[in-house]
Amino acid sequence: MKIRIIISIILAGVFASCESFLEEDNKSGLTADSYYTTLEGIEALVNSCYTPMRFWYGKENGIALTETGTDIFTRGNGMENPPVALYNSDLSGANGPIGFYWTRFYSALNTCNAAVERIPDSPLEEGLKPVRTAEARFLRAFYLWHIVETWGGVHLFTEEVKSIQETATRTSVEEFYNQIFADLEFAVGNLPATSDDYGRANKAAAEAFLARMYLTRGEDALAAQYAKSVINNYSFSLEDNYADLWDIDNVRNPEIVWLVNFTADLVLNEELEHPDGEILLRDGGNNSHLFFLMTYDQLPGMQRDIDNGRPFARFMPTTHLLDLFDETKDARFDATFQTVWYSNNPDNAPEGMQPGDTAIYATKEVVPQSVKDSKVYTIIDRSRTYDENDAPQVRDRYMSVKKFLDPSRLTISQQQGKRDAFVIRLAEMYLIVAEAEMNLGNIGEAVDYFNAIRRRAALPGHETEMEITAADLDLDMILDERAREFAGEQLRWFDLKRTGKLVERVQEWNPDAASNIQPYHSVRPIPQSQLDAVTNKGEFTQNEGYQ
């Protein structure tokens, strides 16, 4: 790997908190060595460790790499990177978005390394130094997890790189996790329990992420211990109503353990990238509201509006995801999916349809043709979207995921969204305890934690019906529940890989990818540009199975 990113110089006086983006342009002529010796400079360096998360969460390719090509999502007709969803021969080292994230994650790693190295000699007050170091190490663990799970045992370094490196080494997955655990244990020991700067890492976030990491590595007792600590020792609580989680005016709610914060200020939501030293301005904000929507605005009686969203039709649900919900008792179905669109375009409405009438109805069931013919509105049923084997036969007419919609946008064309992106919710801690205790043989305790999430998800009056028994609980039940709870939240690919179920469940439930996926797809291809750049090509080679 050739690391071309030299630590960026950050303009003084621009960034007062984690919520602002970093302007990485050295108009002042300052050098890193001089700027980071100032109080303002070292604080800006720590803040810059947060910025790369905004290139992953709420972004099309970050969502594509974590949700599509799984058992619950496949490609819509607008998807710009189909190989990620299909695992076909085009999924190679030439894949642009995978190369993009290789660069961003390694740049983020180097920024965190720089912060860890420079904080001890900085002018920060002594009591604040371990806190800021803990933030940087927490974030370093976060990026290392993404690197090792995405590409496997690739190149690991924990010292700041200030010049081009032309060799790379293979580091074992175990060594990656040793570093991840060391960083997170340090973070738990040195971060404050809470922070007034919303979105800044704290002890609760570190414990929650440590629980996820211990579960990933099969350390079930420790996973349960840290997840229970997050549940019991802080002020978090499950929202009473699952739908309330997604209310744009309630995003900062007591269920959120850690998030990536965005802002309604369109100027601050702009992002500056610097691939290979070139500055490129591109649209920022949380864009997740765009990608799960079918093209409702092309159907009679409808036109695009703010409430229904700007439909990019990038990702569509598999029938398996739809069938996982029993909407007669599980409130998450209606909170997750949009099934009805009301007419907002009288100029394009069929005869007999008035503004506000149903214009589109989507259902996972098969509707007889005679019923469809009898309605003035459009019915998108299972047989219109999927064939008899549940493979998509159209990719622009399907049940949309609505929970990421952003009705606060100012115009119908605005791509930038202000919604904060959830990274860790309290619900995950309950399901981590359930899975870990199940693995440990403590089925009764596992069921108790599992049912806490089921009861919260229940329609009023159906709480008891939603509960499961010890005989019901197994790994597939937990994966099904995680799909219902976290659909679209950039966890699914990691969940299937962690449990060894990626190939099995894609082959069973995703007809688009079933014939292509192989065990080697549990890691992504290393960018060919990186392989071309190293001088020790015989030692640092492409991941098995890829061209």
Image (spheres, rainbow, N blue to C red):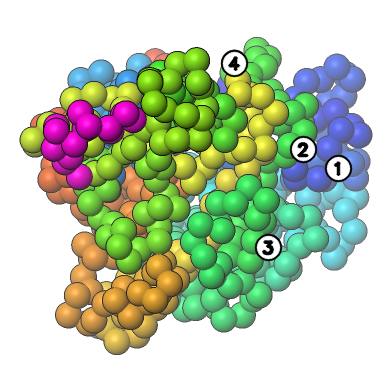
Query: The C terminus lies in which quarter of the figure?
Result: top left
Secondary structure at numbered mark 4: helix
Q: Which residue is mark 1?
A: 16
**Residue 296 visible from this viewpoint:** no
- Counting residues from the start of the chain, the first of labels 3 and 1 encountered is 1
Q: Which residue is mark 4?
A: 276
Secondary structure at numbered mark 1: loop
> How far is disc 1 from disc 4 in space, using C-alphas?
27 Å
Q: Which residue is mark 3?
A: 202
- Counting residues from the start of the chain, the first of labels 4 and 2 encountered is 2
Instruction: Indicate whether residue 522 is drawn in magenta.
Output: no
Question: In terms of depth relative to the viewer, which is nearer, 328 or 292?
Answer: 328
Q: Which residue is mark 2?
A: 20
Residue type for callout 2: Ser
Figure quadrant of residue 270: top right
- Counting residues from the start of the chain, the first of labels 3 and 4 encountered is 3
Is 48 left, or right, of 276 in this rendering? Answer: right
Figure quadrant of residue 154: top left
Instruction: Indicate whether residue 377 is drawn in magenta.
Output: yes
**Percent x, y for residue 326?**
27, 60
> How far is disc 2 from disc 1 in space, using C-alphas?
7 Å
> How far is disc 2 from disc 3 in space, using C-alphas?
18 Å
Name which residue lies at 50% across and 35% down.
356
Residue type for callout 4: Asp
What range of the chain is rendered magenta? Answer: 365-379
Name which residue lies at 51% across and 65% down.
241
Secondary structure at numbered mark 3: loop
**Crowding near pointer 4: few (<14 within 10 Å), some, many (20+)?**
few
- Counting residues from the start of the chain, the first of labels 1 and 4 encountered is 1
> How far is disc 3 from disc 1 in space, using C-alphas?
18 Å
Name which residue lies at 20% across and 45% down.
365
